[in-house]
Each structure stands twice: as structure tokens, then as C-alpha cells.
Image: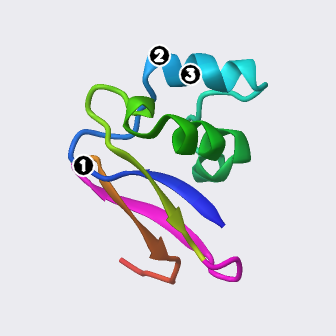
């Protein structure tokens, strides 16, 4: 499965041109739901536009995650990575 993440400090965001392209294809700008980051239309736009898809504080990247892995997006100051989901207690 392909998942879109931000690979720099700042945070995930699309450029206005990428949002426009996504809407032309019938998609919508991703919100805070992680499942929206693997939307095929979003992936298509990022792969097509490359660096131009990212907003002002974004460096968007596509990460391949095996289909049988339960994953989550973790970040530090907006710099994201994919982590395998596991149990935690506080």
C-alpha cells in the first residue's frame, strides 16, 4: 500500500495546484484521518507533480507499506514516518 507522508520539518500540506488537480480528479484534500493519506487519487497527484505537490513547509513522499501491516503516521515537528501499530500503555 502506498501512503503519503511529509519528509521534512513543517507538516503535511498540498500546494494550491495539487489541491486543484486532486479536485479535478474527483478527490478531496486530506484531513487529519490517516486513511486519507493512502487515497489512490492523492497518491496519483503526488507522483505526477513530484516536489510541486507539496505546500510551503512540505516535502511530500510516498512510502510503500506491506498490505498486511497495521500502520500509523508518527511525527516530530511535522517530520513524519510510518510506524507499525502496536499496543502502548501509560
**Disc 3/disc 2 C-alpha distance (Å):** 5 Å
Question: Any mark on residue 19, and which?
Answer: 3
Whether label 3 touches label 2, CB < 8 Å: yes
Residue at mark 2: 16
Tell me if I can see residue 15 in this picture. Answer: yes
| Element on which disc 3 rests | helix
Magenta span: 66-77
* Magenta-drawn stretch contains 67: yes
Residue 68: % across, % down: 70, 83
| Element on which disc 1 rests | loop
Q: Residues within 10 Å of mark 1 (few under 14, many from 20)?
A: some
**Disc 2/disc 1 C-alpha distance (Å):** 19 Å
Q: Nearer the viewer, residue 60 or 71?
A: 60
Residue 8: % across, % down: 24, 49
Question: Does 90 sit above or below residue 27?
Answer: below
* Magenta-drawn stretch contains 35: no
Quadrant of the rendering where the C terminus is positioned:
bottom left
Quadrant of the rendering where the N terminus is positioned:
bottom right
Residue in view at x 68 percent, y 27 percent: 28
Drawn side of residue 90 relative to residue 46, left or right:
left
Looking at the image, tell me whether mark 3 or mark 1 is earlier in sequence order: 1
Residue 17: % across, % down: 50, 17
Whether label 2 touches label 1, CB < 8 Å: no
**Disc 3/disc 1 C-alpha distance (Å):** 20 Å
Question: Any mark on residue 8, and which?
Answer: 1
Drawn side of residue 32 relative to residue 38, left or right:
left
Residue 52: % across, % down: 40, 30
Residue in view at x 28 percent, y 26 percent: 56
Amino acid at each position: 500500500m502506498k501512503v503519503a507522508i511529509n519528509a521534512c520539518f513543517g507538516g503535511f500540506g498540498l500546494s494550491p495546484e495539487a489541491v486543484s488537480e486532486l479536485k479535478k480528479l474527483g478527490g478531496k484534500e486530506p484531513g487529519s484521518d490517516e486513511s486519507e493519506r493512502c487515497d489512490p487519487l492523492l497518491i496519483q497527484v503526488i507522483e505526477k507533480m513530484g516536489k510541486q505537490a507539496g505546500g510551503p513547509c512540505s516535502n511530500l513522499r510516498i512510502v510503500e507499506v506491506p498490505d498486511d501491516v497495521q500502520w500509523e503516521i508518527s511525527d516530530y515537528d511535522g517530520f513524519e514516518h510510518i510506524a507499525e501499530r502496536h499496543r502502548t500503555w501509560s
